[in-house]
Amino acid sequence: MLLTRHLGELWRYRALVAALAGRDLKGRYRGSVLGFLWTFLNPLLLLLVYALVFSVYFRVQMEHYAVFMFTGLLPWIFFSQGLMEGSGAIVDGGSLVTKVLFPQQVLPAVKVVSNFINFLLSLPILLVFMLADGLRPGLTILAFPAVALVHVVFTFACVLVLCVATVFMRDTRHILGNLITLWFFLTPVLYPLTQVPERWRWLVYLNPAAVFSLSYQDALFWGRWPRWDHLGLLALFSLVILAVGARIFEHYKEYFAEKI
Amino acid sequence: MSSSPAIEVSDLVKRFRREMLVRDYGTWKSLLLRPFSRQRRRDLVTVLDGVSFGVNPGRTCAIIGQNGSGKSTLLKILAGIYKPDAGVVNVRGRVSSLIELGAGFHPEFSGRENVQLNATILGLSKKEIAERFDHIVAYSGLGEYIDAPVRTYSSGMYVRLGFSVAVNVDPDVLLVDEVLAVGDEAFAHKCEDKVNEFRRAGKTIVLVTHDLGAVEKYADEVIWLDGGCVAARGEPKPVIDAYRQKVAVQEDEIRRDQCVSAGELKQERWGDGDVVIEAVRVLDAAGQERAVFQHGEALTLEMDYRQTKPTEDLVFGVAISTAQGVLCYGSNTHIDRAELGQAPPRGTVRLAVERLDLVQGTYLLDVAAHDRDGRAYDYIKQIASFAVRSPVGDEGVFRPPHRWSLSPRGEA
């Protein structure tokens, strides 16, 4: 089957995915004085900025708001960065696309993996903040790997489609950048679900990013199990997009080298 | 070794959409407007048109041809980077392509890290990399620089490192695109050694290059691509000669166009006009106008003149000098004591040169009509230019017919 072949190739080239993701991660801060420390420093500083804006200026009336917001923000950064970088993976692949032969899905996969690792590396900071704020993560933290797995599959599936679209229509990236901003505010990251009028909540559940955000918040912040039904449906949905994405990718990949 | 060919290509066709060639990236806008534009949708350029050939295992095959003849496209199809639009391509065995050296090098990483990365990209397993790593580093000859970031490398170092990785992939089929031309002398020798080593080891090599000397040295067979078709195929010598001939003819046409405009010639003309040189032609042995000659060919100069006043002692002269202005040869009908008889009022003077023993280069031609004392009737400097092509790289201006020999001393 096409999907299994597609993923099988990816698996056979996992060493390359790892090597390129490592290049991305290590290369990002190479040459800077603080080096790899930036991987931790960046989310930390971001957290402080958001905490300043929403706790000091906007004075959001919610206990442990900074930690709450951070629980949703970190996965969102993974998701949005993954989409942005992933959609340009083929176009930015340069000589790796035009001059070397290997399964091209490696390139978008690398962007998802490297951003996911970045996400994982920022989790200790979240943990430190939780503890500093007097919060103890509950047992529900065990749901995290399941949520993260679905999240990665969903992100990769989207990226597969987007990176193909970007090859043929360079506008995709610019449109995507704006859409992501809109999507961010439509997703309960900065606000809890309870802020959404009851009438419109069903709409929130139609937003995959919202389901992820809520799941992370449940597991890490509220200390309750995520909505498995929503997550399960989303997992199925992700697989469907993945199958579609793989088909689109496989169909168009022969034109990549010519189009770039 | 199996007897089936290592590379089999039959009726290969490759087309590109023209908009790709002019880099018109598809945008939502162009996509939306396309139905309304007059540009036909299937505007295709055929880059390879029915190419067929086979290369047996252990043979070295060179692909030659002018720019845009489809050489690199063919190589990319062999490497599997492009898909053919029609036809069959079969490449048996592990392929390593020296199409791009150091693809995926990260400028901020050290040479050492990039070797790891590049080897992974080229499909080596962790174990294979570990085994070959020291050899790759040693082979690159970068010494202590191997731990410096690649962005600090000179382009030569960059290529050396990329080359070291690529050739240590241990391929069955090696595709080489013009990379041997970079790097210094020592690197060129290394490349040469490596290619020879591959040949001894019975690897199949496909080489794309403009260096016809290298082709003659390495290739067992040559494919000449012209306009996307195989123009000739076979033993190196005849194919290369045919190719050279074709290039010379084309060059000739271009040069002749330039000569008509005479843009680059700094023509000067003086004289009292009692005799006017009306036309000058440079002809080959067949009497055709030519601007490019092979060394040793016959050449004839023709001058049409007209006398506006009757003159007694008309002398015609010709001078050939290099593009740098060094006079190679100058003579006239008086010096040569040519017995031409009384010049008619209108006529054509011919100077037949049996052998053009000039070395490769561009030469400028001056012509003159003057009297015996040197008073010019019409003197034209740089009226025409012609080029001499030679497969030999000797220097100077003049090549006397010669031959080398060697004998022990004391005998004869």
Image: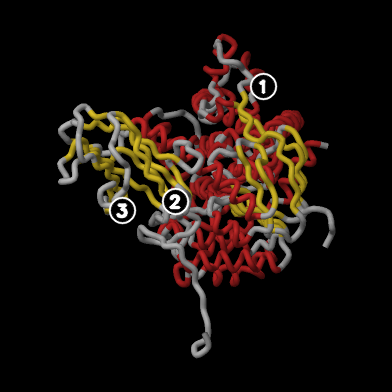
Do marks 3 and 2 share a subunit? yes
Q: Chain of mark 3?
A: B
Q: Amino acid at mark 1?
A: Leu
Chain on which label 2 sits: B
Position of residue A114 measured from the top left corner of the image (x, y, whole percent): 58, 47
Q: Specify whether residue A225 is in view.
A: no
Mark 1 lies on residue: A206
Q: Earlier in the sequence, mark 3 or mark 2?
A: 3
Q: Is residue B348 left or right of residue A83?
A: left
Viewer-side label of 2, 1:
2
Mark 3 sits on what residue? Answer: B329
Q: Quadrant of residue A206?
A: top right
User: Alpha-carbon distance for marks 3 and 1?
Assistant: 90 Å
Q: Position of residue B146 (x, y in %)?
A: 48, 67
Answer with the quarter of the image where residue A187 lies: top right
Residue type, mark 2 in image: Glu
Is the residue marked by circle 2 packed among few (<14), some (14-19), or many (20+) residues within 10 Å? few
| Label placed on residue B354 | 2
Residue sitting at 41 percent across and 29 percent down?
A59
Q: Position of residue A40 (x, y in %)?
A: 48, 50
- Residue at the extreme top: B36
Report which quarter residue A6 is drawn in. top right
With B91 as the anchor, is A86 left or right in this view? left
Q: Position of residue A70 (x, y in %)?
A: 52, 38
On screen, B55 above or below B22?
A: below
Residue type at mark 3: give it. Answer: Tyr
Crowding around mark 3 (Cα neighbors within 10 Å: few <14, some 14 to 19, many 20+) is: few
Residue at x 59% of width, y 11% of height:
B35
